[in-house]
Image (cartoon, rainbow, N blue to C red):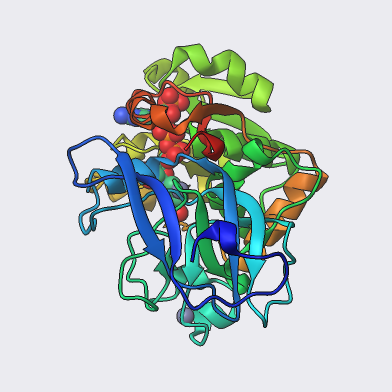
Amino acid sequence: MNTETLTMGKAVGNEAVASRGYAAMDSKSALAQFQFKRRPVGEHDVLIRIKYCGVCHSDIHQARNEWNGSKYPMVPGHEIVGEVSAVGNAVTKFKVGERAGVGCMVDSCRKCDACVAGEEQYCKDTVWTYNSPEGHIGTVTYGGYSDNIVVDENYALRISDDADLASTAPLLCAGITTYSPLRHWNVGPGMKVGVVGLGGLGHMGVKLAHSMGADVTVFTTSKGKAEDARRLGADHVILSTDPDAMKAQAGTFDFILDAVSANHDIDALLAMLKQDRHMVVVGLPTRPHALYAGSLISGRKTLSGSGIGGIKETQEMLDYCAKNRIGSDVEVIPIQKINEAYERTVKGDVKYRFVIDMSTL
Ligand code: NAP
Ligand code: ZN
Ligand code: ZN
C-alpha cells in the first residue's frame, strides 16, 4: 500500500506500507537512502506520517554496533512525532489528522508483571522501535529516520496541539529517560541534584529537575557549556575534570543522574553523594564501568540504573512538558546531514539535540 492511496478515515490495509528512509547498511559505512516495507495497517494500528525525528546517542551506538546485536539494514530513530494519516477499524485513541508520537517501544507481551504495571520497557519481550524482530511480517522493526511508521495505538503517544513539534520529538526518549528516574526517586524541592553530561539526555534532566523544584548542579567536561547550563535551569556548574572543584562538593548531593555516553569515573561521582543517597545511570557506554566497592560501602550509597519509561509515564511526561512549556533545545537538520550530525554528537558538538526535518527526505 502506498501511503498516498490511503483515504481519510478508518482503514485497514492488507498490503504492506511502502516506506522510504535512511539506513545503516553495516556498522562502518555512512547512513544512506533505503526503501523498505512496513506491515499493513492492522485493526489496532495507526499509520503516522513522520514530521520530525530526534537523533539519540543510542542510534549511534546501535548503527555502529557498539552494543553488539545490531541487524542491518538498520533504520534508526525512536524520537518520532508526526500526524496520523490512517487508522485501523478498531482504533479509538486517534483520529486521522491528529498528532502522534512514538518512542523507543512499539509492542511488548502485555501480560507480564512489568507490562501490567505499565512498565513495558522492562518486559522481556519488548519490541523496540528498530532493530527488533517484527512479529507480523518477519522482518526487523524499522525506526523513525523515515517517512512513516505503522504502530499499535497502545504504543503511540498523544502530542498536544500547542507543543512545538520539533522540540517535542526528543521528549520521546531523552525526555522520558530523565523524567522517569527523577519521579521514581522523588526529586523535588529541598534536594540537591546533580546531572552528569550536558548532552541530549542531560539537558532534559536539567530542565526537568529544575521544573520539579530541585537545586540543580551540572557536572560537565565541557567548560564552554557552563553558561548554557545556567540558562537551561542549573543553579551551579562543576567542571568534573577539576579535582579541586569536585573535592569541594564531596558528600553534599541527594541524588545524581548520570547521562554520559562514554566510560568515565563513577567513583568520583559517588563521592559527591551524602550518606544513603542514590546515583542513577541512564548513559549506556560500550564497555563496563570500573567501580570501587568502597565508593558504595562508605556512606551506604546506592548505584542504580533506569531505562526510558513506560507508555503511561511517557504520556504523563508529555502532558507535563506541554503544561510547563518544556521542550528540547534542538538543531533541526535535513536528513542529508545525518552522518555529519553523528560525528558532531560523538564530539559533543550539539546544542542539545539534532532533530531531522523529515520533509527533507
Ligand atoms: P549525547 O547527547 O551525546 O550526550 C552525552 C554527553 O556525555 C556529552 O554531551 C558529554 O557531556 C558527556 N560525555 C561524552 N563523552 C564523555 C566522556 N568521555 N567523559 C565524560 N563525559 C562525556 O548522548 P545522549 O543522547 O544524551 O545519550 C547519553 C547516553 O544515554 C548514551 O549512552 C545513550 O545510549 C544512553 N541512553 C540511555 C537510555 C536509557 O533508557 N537508559 C535512553 C536513551 C539514551 P559534557 O560535554 O557536558 O561533559
Ligand atoms: Zn534514545
Ligand atoms: Zn511483558
Q: How many marks?
A: 0
Q: Is residue 191 left or right of residue 31?
A: right
Specify the farthest residue to the bottom: 111
Query: Taking the image as four quarters, which one is ligand 1 found in?
Result: top left
Q: Is residue 13 visible?
A: yes
In the rendering, at what x and y percent does residue 287 appear?
22, 46
| Image quadrant in which you'd find residue 309 | bottom right
**Camera-side residue of 228 and 34:** 34
Is 177 above or below relative to 269?
Answer: below
At x 41%, y 70%, the residue is 127
**Camera-side residue of 276 and 211:** 211
Q: Is residue 300 visible?
A: no
At x 30%, y 52%, the residue is 74
At x 38%, y 49%, the residue is 76
Q: Is residue 263 left or right of residue 129?
A: left
Q: Is residue 187 left or right of residue 243?
A: right
In the rendering, at what x and y percent does residue 55 appear?
45, 39
At x 70%, y 74%, the residue is 10
| Image quadrant in which you'd find residue 214 | top right
**Camera-side residue of 273 and 196:** 196
In the rendering, at what x and y percent does residue 335 appear?
44, 33
